[in-house]
């Protein structure tokens, strides 16, 4: 009742009432859904998996190539969803092992803990994104606790296994473009896995892809290489270079291609480190064709050795001349009939570094504050292989016989032969100015020779004209 309004109210009338506001507090559950990773896989739609990925990892424009939803039960309890991104995450495009990259979100009993624990997956799986919810880790988890945790070790192994299964599923998909997309984005990570993860190396190697001398613009696996092998072939041949085009130009690869063998092209600096961890595959030995002492399964090694000894004796003059003219540049000169189209090639000794690796090591040394002086010591271990049947080498032999070993023209010709072999074999020219001068000198000699030929021809024509006029008179 309104006491103020009812103060003068006559007796017997109904009292006047007033409205008094009253405030109450209550809670309403807005989100009745379980976290997506706590639901069973058959309860979650593909669209929900996609929406969760895009919202949780701020990847609005990225559709994952694959995902897996699983749980661990028994000794430990854990639920997880993992994704393979459709494109390389932005933070990894600048640094493939960016420490600030947030790839795996760790929860303990549905409480978010951290998304920057490096030890939860090996770094070669840095690109895999996902959620892990453990029931067995303590809530006050720290990096030190994680490093000593047996629970984490079990989770780590399972995450690696599930990630490999996803990659294999992409590889076996009918749409081959999916794995090509995956390889272009994340192939380097698998190569790191071969180097660092000995436990899973055998599972990773079949997933590697390479360009080859026969694949054109398409990638090939080691299994595909083996399928295309010649009969009785027991070696897998490869060459390292700074790109597919340079690998195709390599005289070392030419030695193998000319005999009908396919060659793998290893075109990145990491490839050479990676391939050292794969000495063989399915009982086939991997062989670097740019190393000295290359041999083939279809020929007798003793016969090959005897034939090369005969070649070196038959062409001893040009061999000795080249070793003298190129002293300090090459370890030795070897005459070989393995080259078909190139006059010469530079190859490394058994333990020498390829030119690609030399440049990589030099860059690492300079980046660490060192100097690149002395880094070319391994370059001097190169062996110059010479094709005695090539016209350029035959011309050099003629110069040596006719002009002698002290001929400046022959020496310039020898150094130019070496420079061309170095360039086509992937090395850098130490003195580009000197190289240019030798080219100009050769062009000048050729130009003068052509001018003399024209003058002689003109004189002959004039003489014939005079004789014809004399006869007519």
Image (spheres, helix red, strand yellow):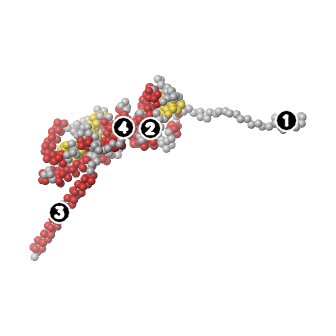
According to the picture, the residue beneath numbered tag 3 turns out to be 453
* Label 2 vs 4, first from the N-terminus: 2
Tell me the residue at 46%/33% (across/down). 117
Q: Is mark 4 on a helix, strand or loop?
A: helix
Residue 134: image location, x then y, percent: 50, 28
Residue 67: image location, x then y, percent: 46, 36
Q: Of circles 3 and 2, which is in front?
A: 2
Label count reads 4
Badge 1 crowding class, 10 Å Cα cut-off, few under 14, some 14 to 19, many 20 or more, is some
According to the picture, the residue beneath numbered tag 1 turns out to be 15
Tell me the residue at 17%/67% (across/down). 458
Badge 3 crowding class, 10 Å Cα cut-off, few under 14, some 14 to 19, many 20 or more, is few
How far apart marks 2 and 4 lie (CA) works out to: 19 Å
Question: Is residue 248 visible to us here?
Answer: no
Instruction: Using the image as rendered, state which of residue 109 and residue 374 is in the foreground.
Output: 374
Q: Residue 99 carries which label?
A: 2
Badge 4 crowding class, 10 Å Cα cut-off, few under 14, some 14 to 19, many 20 or more, is many
Quarter of image, res 87: top left
Residue 382: image location, x then y, percent: 24, 43
């Amino acid at each position: 009742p309104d006491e103020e309004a009812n103060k003068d109210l006559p007796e017997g009338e109904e009292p006047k009432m007033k409205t008094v506001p009253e405030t109450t507090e209550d809670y309403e559950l807005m989100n009745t859904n379980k976290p997506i990773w706590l639901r069973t896989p058959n309860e979650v739609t593909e669209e929900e998996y996609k929406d969760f990925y895009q919202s949780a990892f701020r990847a609005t424009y990225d559709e994952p190539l694959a995902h897996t939803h699983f749980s661990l039960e028994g000794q430990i309890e854990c639920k997880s969803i993992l994704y393979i991104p459709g494109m390389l995450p932005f933070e990894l495009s600048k640094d493939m092992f960016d420490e600030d990259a947030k790839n795996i979100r760790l929860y303990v009993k549905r409480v978010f803990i951290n998304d920057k624990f490096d030890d939860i997956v090996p770094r070669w799986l840095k690109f895999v994104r996902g959620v892990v919810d453990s029931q067995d880790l303590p809530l006050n988890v720290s990096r030190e606790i994680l490093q000593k945790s047996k629970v984490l070790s079990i989770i780590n192994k399972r995450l690696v296994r599930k990630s490999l299964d996803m990659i294999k599923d992409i590889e076996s998909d009918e749409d081959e473009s999916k794995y090509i997309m995956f390889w272009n984005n994340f192939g380097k990570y698998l190569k790191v896995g071969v180097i660092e993860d000995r436990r899973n190396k055998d599972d990773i190697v079949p997933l590697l892809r390479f360009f080859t001398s026969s694949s054109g613009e398409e990638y090939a696996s080691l299994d595909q290489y083996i399928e295309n092998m010649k009969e009785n072939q027991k070696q897998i041949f490869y060459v390292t270079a700074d790109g597919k085009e340079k690998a195709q130009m390599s005289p070392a690869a030419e030695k193998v291609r000319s005999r009908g063998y396919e060659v793998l092209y290893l075109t990145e600096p990491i490839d050479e480190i990676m391939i050292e961890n794969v000495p063989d595959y399915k009982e086939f030995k991997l062989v670097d064709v740019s190393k000295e002492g290359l041999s083939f399964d279809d020929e007798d090694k003793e016969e090959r050795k005897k034939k090369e000894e005969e070649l070196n004796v038959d062409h001893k003059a040009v061999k000795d001349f080249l070793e003298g003219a190129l002293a300090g540049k090459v370890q030795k000169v070897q005459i070989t009939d393995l080259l078909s189209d190139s006059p010469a090639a530079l190859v490394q000794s058994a333990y020498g570094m390829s030119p690609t690796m030399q440049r990589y090591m030099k860059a690492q040394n300079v980046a660490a504050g060192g100097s690149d002086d002395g880094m070319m010591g391994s370059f001097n271990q190169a062996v110059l292989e010479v094709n005695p049947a090539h016209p350029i080498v035959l011309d050099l032999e003629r110069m040596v016989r006719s002009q002698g070993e002290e001929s400046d023209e022959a020496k310039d010709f020898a150094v130019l032969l070496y420079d061309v072999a170095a360039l086509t074999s992937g090395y850098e020219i130490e003195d580009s100015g000197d190289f240019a001068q030798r080219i100009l000198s050769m062009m000048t000699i050729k130009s003068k020779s052509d001018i003399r030929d024209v003058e002689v021809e003109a004189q002959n024509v004039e003489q014939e004209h005079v004789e014809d006029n004399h006869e007519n008179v």
